Image (cartoon, helix red, strand yellow):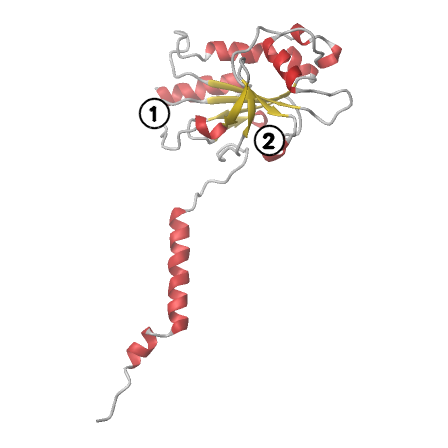
Amino acid sequence: MRLHEDEAAGITDSPLLMVATLVVAGLMVVALTADPIATGTDVGDRAPELQSMAYNGNGWVAFNLESYIDESWEEGQPGQWMIIEFLDTDCPYCFNTADQLGDWDDFFDADNPEWDNEDVQVIAVAAELNIQGHDSSREEIQAFRDKTSGYTCASQQDCNARSGSPHAFPYVDDLSLDAMDDWGIRGTPTYFVIQPDGIVAWNSDNTARYENAAEAVANLAAVVAA
């Protein structure tokens, strides 16, 4: 009996065709599962990672911005927004405007009836710019946050002379400037407003829309809660 070759089977069993099929299938899986949102600091980007040690008033503890993020959050739902300031304890402007960050933290509190919204988490990231006379340390960061004496901050002033009251939010150590590099920070202070899902909602370059971070939160978070 003469054996007949099954041409269809021959095509199906072709190693090259099988490889091509697997490649196409793999690309489809990647396309369906890949995050379409870019990581960056422009409005609409997913905020970069921020991991370090942070001073919370009692000591230095591990900090990870990811722990504040709820990726399942959807617009129109309650959630915790964030205000992040990159500062330098030897930066005169940061020194003289530290009161506003404390005021924002007090106002955007869930227990404040004037705000009547979810608590907004304020986070300070303390760096040391490569500028003559800028020589910070963890001890100086603590003194800046708590307004304690014995350490020199901006313009050779004692840290307890900075504007405002002692702060109650975490100060992240970025003396290595790793976060400054990851976030593309060119100077201090630089501000960001982050949505509960980790997306950048406003930054210091976006002042044409909202003058500052507080105005951005008051409008954006209030709209979400409406």
In the image, is residue 104 above or below residue 38? above
In the image shown, does 42 or 167 lie closer to the viewer? 167
Amino acid on which disc 2 is placed: Ala
Question: The C terminus appears in which quarter of the rendering?
Answer: top left
Q: Earlier in the sequence, mark 1 or mark 2?
A: 1
Q: Are marks 1 and 2 in contact (CB under 8 Å)?
A: no
In the rendered structure, find residue 77 and report the number of the disc placed on it: 1
* Residue 114 appears left or right of 8: right
Tell me the crowding category of disc 2: few under 14, some 14 to 19, or many 20 or more residues within 10 angstroms, Cα based.
many
Tell me the crowding category of disc 1: few under 14, some 14 to 19, or many 20 or more residues within 10 angstroms, Cα based.
few
Q: Mark 2 highlights which residue?
A: 179
Residue sitting at x 42%, y 30% = 197
Amino acid on which disc 1 is placed: Gln
Q: CA distance from mark 1 to mark 2?
A: 30 Å
* Residue 16 appears left or right of 214: left
Secondary structure found at label 1: loop
Residue at the limit of the structure toward the left, as seen here = 1
